[in-house]
Image (cartoon, helix red, strand yellow):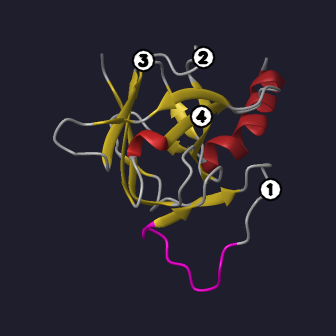
């Protein structure tokens, strides 16, 4: 029994040590780190002198990947985004359960808020991918035909 507990702790430790806790906390994905991938999934080299928490430029088909995994307990996740030079409805969120063999699954595109115009929007996910009490990787993709700048990108798990 002790050996099983030790194996579980050792196999989960690297994941949990890197993950952001999402319950009741607003996660700022630009501030907590990210990396960019091209349409083929290749990591795009970061230019020298880039600053975390500034607008992130995404070409069409490129994705912003959260550097830290998020812990999900099964409650409602609400994501908010502000973009410039494009419509927020062209920003798609995909998720993947950490450790799963499958790829990313789309959770949908952001929806503009009534008072935010085309540049500010949200996406609500009530059940993520149906797996609870696990870590997720998140990927935000520009599905439009023009380059967009992501000015703000946050997420929060809330009680139903």
Alpha-carbon span between mark 3 and mark 4: 14 Å
Alpha-carbon span between mark 3 and mark 2: 11 Å
Alpha-carbon span between mark 4 and mark 2: 14 Å
Q: Residue at x 50, y 65 (%)?
A: 56
Whether residues under marks 3 and 1 lie with C-beta atoms below 8 angstroms apart, the answer is no
Q: Residue at x 34, y 45 (%)?
A: 26
Q: Of tags 3 and 2, which is closer to the observer? A: 3
Q: Which residue is mark 1?
A: 42
Q: Compared to 56, does 107 lie above or below?
A: above
Q: Residue furthest front?
A: 145
> In terms of sequence position, does the residue under pointer 3 or pointer 4 come before the other?
4
* Left or right of 10 on screen, residue 25: left
* Left or right of 122 on screen, residue 150: right
Q: Which residue is mark 2?
A: 131
> In terms of sequence position, does the residue under pointer 3 or pointer 2 come before the other?
3
Q: Would you say the magenta stretch is mainly helix, strand or loop?
A: loop
> In terms of sequence position, does the residue under pointer 4 or pointer 2 come before the other?
4
- The reply to whether the magenta stretch includes residue 141 is no
Q: Which residues are magenta?
A: 46-55
Alpha-carbon span between mark 4 and mark 1: 16 Å
């Amino acid at each position: 029994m002790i050996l099983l507990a030790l194996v579980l702790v050792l196999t989960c430790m690297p994941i949990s040590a890197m993950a952001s806790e999402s319950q009741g906390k607003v996660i700022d994905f630009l501030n907590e780190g990210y990396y960019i991938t091209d349409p083929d999934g290749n990591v795009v080299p970061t230019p020298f002198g880039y600053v975390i928490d500034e607008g992130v430029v995404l070409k069409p088909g490129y994705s912003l990947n959260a550097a830290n995994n998020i812990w999900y307990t099964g409650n409602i996740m609400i994501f908010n985004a502000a973009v410039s030079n494009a419509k927020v409805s062209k920003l798609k969120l995909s998720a993947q359960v950490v450790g799963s063999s499958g790829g990313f699954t789309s959770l949908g595109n952001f929806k503009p808020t009534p008072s935010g115009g085309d540049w500010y929007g949200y996406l609500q996910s009530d059940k993520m991918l149906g797996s609870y009490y696990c870590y997720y990787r998140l990927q935000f993709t520009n599905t439009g035909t023009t380059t967009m700048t992501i000015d703000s990108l946050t997420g929060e798990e809330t009680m139903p």
